[in-house]
Image (spheres, rainbow, N blue to C red):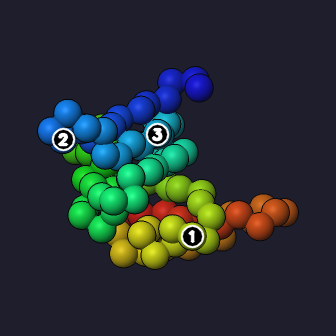
């Protein structure tokens, strides 16, 4: 991955979540985000996204994802943006 970033959330010696993203200009693009099932709903995914805003000079974050985690992104304030692509992938943006 060219100039990508990987950060993990570790607590009590155990990795509980991970985020993979890249930054171009002032936009971060989430390539992958995952939290172990037994720790979901505890704010770990939100902490990983907050980390990007706190450590990097970004004004927005985007993410392409499957429909199975739409509610996570919507809860965090992402909106669906029109990507004008020819395939069935949605892009979510948080400004």
Residue 90, labelled with which disc? none
70 left or right of 44? right
Q: Residue at x 54, y 45 (%)?
A: 31
* Mark closer to the chain start, 2 or 3: 2
- Is the residue under label 3 in contact with that under label 2 (CB below 8 Å)? no
Q: Give the answer, above or below, for where 77 lies relative to 4.
A: below
Residue at the top extreme?
A: 2
Question: Residue 64, located in which quarter of the rendered image?
Answer: bottom right
Q: In which image quadrant can residue 94 be found?
A: bottom left
Q: Residue beneath label 1, please?
A: 68
Residue located at (52% from left, 72% from top): 70
At 84% from the left and 63% from the top, the residue drawn is 86
Q: Are marks 2 and 1 in contact (CB under 8 Å)?
A: no
Separation (CA) of disc 1 from disc 3: 18 Å
Depicted 94 relative to depicted 6: above or below: below
Of the 4 image quadrants, the one containing the C terminus is bottom left
Residue 38 in the image: above or below residue 27: below
* Screen quadrant of the N terminus: top right
Q: SS for tag 3?
A: strand
Q: Which residue is mark 2?
A: 11
**Residue located beneath label 3 in the image:** 20
Residue 56: where, in percent of width, then height?
30, 38
How packed mark 1 is, by other alpha carbons closer than 10 Å (few <14, some 14-19, many 20 or more), is few
Q: Which residue is nearer to you in this view: 37 or 57?
A: 37
Whole-angstrom CA distance, mark 2 to mark 1, is 26 Å
Label 2, label 3: how far apart the Cα atoms are = 18 Å
User: In the image, residue 5 lies at what x, y percent?
Assistant: 43, 31
For this orientation, the residue located farthest to the right is 86
Q: Is residue 68 visible?
A: yes
**Circle nearer the viewer, 2 or 3:** 2
- The extreme left residue here reads 12
């Amino acid at each position: 991955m060219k100039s990508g970033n990987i950060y993990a959330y570790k607590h009590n010696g155990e990795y509980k979540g991970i985020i993979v993203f890249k930054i171009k200009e002032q936009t971060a693009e989430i390539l992958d985000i995952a939290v172990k099932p037994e720790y979901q709903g505890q704010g770990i995914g939100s902490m990983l996204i907050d980390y990007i805003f706190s450590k990097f000079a970004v004004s927005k974050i985007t993410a392409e994802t499957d429909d199975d985690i739409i509610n996570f992104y919507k809860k965090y304030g992402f909106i669906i943006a029109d990507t004008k692509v020819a395939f069935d992938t949605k892009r979510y943006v948080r400004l």
